[in-house]
Amino acid sequence: MTPGARVQAAIEVLEAVLAGAPAERELTAWARGSRYAGSKDRAAVRDHVFDALRRLRSAAWAGGLGDVPPEAMQARPLMAGLLRTQGIDPEGLFTGQGHAPAALDALPEPGPAPEAIALDCPDWLLPLMRDALADTTGPILSALRDRAPVILRANNVRIDRDALRARLAAEGVETCPHPLSPSALEVEGPVRGLAIKPSFLEGLFELQDAGSQALIDRLPDPRGQRILDLCAGGGGKALALAARGADDVTAHDIDPGRMRDLPARTARAGVHIAQTIEPEAEGPFDGVILDVPCTGSGSWRRAPEAKWRLTRDRLDELTALQSQILDRAVALTRPGGWLAYMTCSLLDSENDAQVAAALSRHPSLQEDLRWRCTPLDRADGFFLSVLRKV
């Protein structure tokens, strides 16, 4: 594919995403229907789409669309504006030749963008971000406009970080230690084909953000404890906990289908994690991990369309759900045990305010630890509060 043809493909995918379709689904459908596209073509189209979604408002502004909601945006000027913000002359790609997009009318000079547009943040959300992030608001929102680093977690059941780094180098993957966690390696240079590397197939590493790894590092020693991962999802944190030495971990999710890959992942990692559909029948537990559903605002680099689909009503629904899950986790924790409340959110209403409310509702709780990281730490944004039931 020519560079222009890649841009046209990205425009077609973006049209569907702007209409409400999930970006990953549309990219997969395009790749399956475009057998002529090589791996570099697919990667380039994916990069165009995700770069546009991360910088949706500023790209639309630069493309002459002005201040319009995502559902009213047009993909052609949006992509032209994105190229403009990247220092690329869109006229060189919008040629109408071959499979390139048709030539553009002259793009207007957009002028300085309002702050929320320049930071690619919904207007209603910017004050909430300022409340939570204070003078780091601008730098953090700017960091969310760029792609996230690729981080690996050394599976310490089978290999330490230094040995994994040497093994990966022998397989053509250069990495460097990440300061947030002693198990984390950041991939340097191109990131292609990690899931087919022999070291991955042997269970020597998992892909997991450094902040997510750091949460598990800060939990109480799991050895000899019965621990429940209450909102397990794909089981990444349960696997990381097992790699720390936990030998009695049970995973639960309200949607068991999210855990369907967990048996294969545990077999590859060389650990055992049980699953349950009714944790109350097996409790109480010594420790409960609750990585609750949240806005995901700390990880919007990875799922950028979520930023534009979040509403005030949805935020209220999430905070109500988080409170319910916290109360359930308290009931599942034995006296003297601990629970770890986690989000990948940057917002106070999902983090500090939830902990304060839980401490008020449950006099038996005390907080042992509070920790957070942001994209300024070369990680996703995470929040952790470790509560003890006295």
Image (cartoon, rainbow, N blue to C red):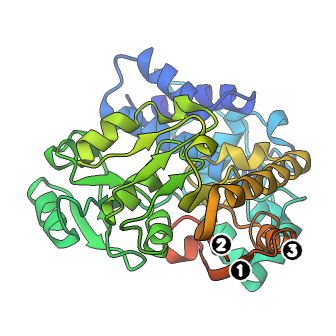
| Along the viewing direction, whichever of 380 and 79 lies nearer the viewer | 380
For marks 3 and 2, give the one nearer the viewer: 3
Which residue is most to the left? 170
In this rendering, the answer to whether 275 lies above or below 289 is above
Percent position (x, y) of residue 353?
82, 71
Between disc 1 and disc 3, whose residue precedes? 3
Which disc number belongs to residue 162?
A: none
Percent position (x, y) of residue 80?
64, 43
The answer, for residue 361, to whether it is visible in the render is yes
Q: Which residue is mark 2?
A: 140
In this rendering, the answer to whether 62 lies above or below 154 is above
Which disc number belongs to residue 360?
A: 3
- Residue flagged by tag 1: what amino acid is it? Gln
The secondary element bearing badge 3 is classed as helix
- Residue flagged by tag 2: what amino acid is it? Ile
In this rendering, the answer to whether 51 lies above or below 265 is below
The answer, for residue 341, to whether it is visible in the render is no
- State the separation of the CA atoms marked 1 and 3: 10 Å
Residue drawn at (51%, 69%), measured in percent from left and top? 215
- State the separation of the CA atoms marked 2 and 1: 30 Å
Q: Is residue 127 left or right of residue 223?
A: right
State which quarter of the image contains the C terminus.
bottom right
Percent position (x, y) of residue 76?
68, 34
Which disc number belongs to residue 366?
A: 1
Asked whether disc 2 touches disc 1, contact meaning CB atoms under 8 Å apart, the reply is no
Residue drawn at (16%, 58%), measured in percent from left and top? 168
Q: Is residue 320 left or right of residue 273?
A: right
Q: How many marks?
A: 3
The secondary element bearing badge 1 is classed as strand
Asked whether disc 1 touches disc 3, contact meaning CB atoms under 8 Å apart, the reply is no
